[in-house]
Image (cartoon, grey):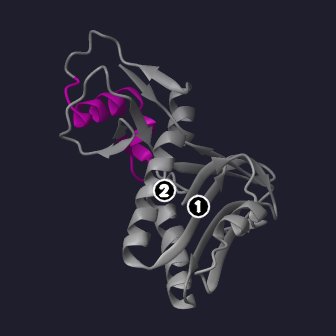
Amino acid sequence: MLIRIVDQVDLQEAYQYLQAPTAGGIDLFIGTVRDNAKGKNVVKLVFEAYAPMALKEMRKIADRAQAQWPLERLVMLHAVGEKRVGEPVVIIGVASAHRDAAFTACRFLIDELKKTVPIWKKEYYQDNSVWVNAHP
Amino acid sequence: MEILLFGITREIVGHSALRVPPGEETLHTVGDLKNWLASRYPELKKLSSLAVAVDSEYAMDDQPLSPQNEIALIPPVSGG
């Protein structure tokens, strides 16, 4: 598996890693910066990670996915730092013999990443900024 | 004992790490640490949740602490 915290996620790197002769399907999820949140214009996002723990938690999620579905390859890449509207932030990819497992595992990996991996984003609007999810 | 701070906890405390004075010998567990922090930084109590990681693993409140541990505050995560 390829699991990294990086300054910029690289789609080519992910796709190259995912190619396998035994895989009949490659599923890629790319999370990008949206220009709005809760009715406000988003100018940029800034991500930070507790990298050693984030990598550990990502590996745990990847292990769970590999135990549950027959995956030939698995990629989890997450960016840190400042990201502008439209830029990719996270790439999740899996390769499997058949598409069902690829779709399901890909969905599982991004959903679980959002729950437990210690990465934080701050949303910057025109006039202020907030740490996402910090307050009820 | 040093505590790593991230995201909003770093902004609340004003530093990326916090040193607990050696005199604070009442901090035996993760729960003790959380109470100690909440009394000093009331803004922490307003967060949706606040977890503590010990040696880069999520820790329960009854987990013992030692000065050799790497300790970090984990405010609500928002990756992806």
The structure residue drawn at horizontal position 50% and vertical position 85%, both measured from the top left corner, is A101
Q: Give the range drawn in magenta.
A: B27-52
At mark 1, the secondary structure is: strand
The structure residue drawn at horizontal position 62% and vertical position 87%, both measured from the top left corner, is A24
At mark 2, the secondary structure is: helix
Magenta span includes A58? no
Q: Name the residue under label 1.
A: A76
Left or right of B9: which side holds A60? left
Q: Report, in whole angstroms, how far the alpha carbon at label 2 lies from the one at label 1.
A: 7 Å
Front residue of this view, candidates B40 and B55:
B55
Residue B80 on image: x %, y %: 60, 61
Front residue of this view, candidates B44 and A80:
A80
- Residue A58 numbered tag: 2
Give amino acid for label 2: Met
Are the two marked residues, 2 and 1, in contact with CB atoms closer than 8 angstroms?
A: yes
- Marked residue nearer the N-terminal end (2 or 1): 2
Q: Assign the magenta stretch its main secondary structure.
A: helix
The structure residue drawn at horizontal position 63% and vertical position 79%, both measured from the top left corner, is A21
Q: Is residue B67 placed above or below A124 in the rendered structure?
A: above
Residue A42 lies in quadrant? bottom right
The structure residue drawn at horizontal position 81% and vertical position 53%, both measured from the top left corner, is A126
Magenta span includes B36? yes
Image quadrant where one finds the N terminus of chain A = bottom right
* Chain for numbered disc 1: A
Residue B73 lies in quadrant? top left
Residue B56 on image: x %, y %: 39, 40
Residue A73 on image: x %, y %: 56, 70
Q: Count residues near mark 2 (Cα–Cα under 10 Å), then give few for <14, some for 14-19, many for 20+.
A: many
Q: Is residue A87 placed above or below B70 in the rendered structure?
A: below
Residue B12 on image: x %, y %: 52, 33
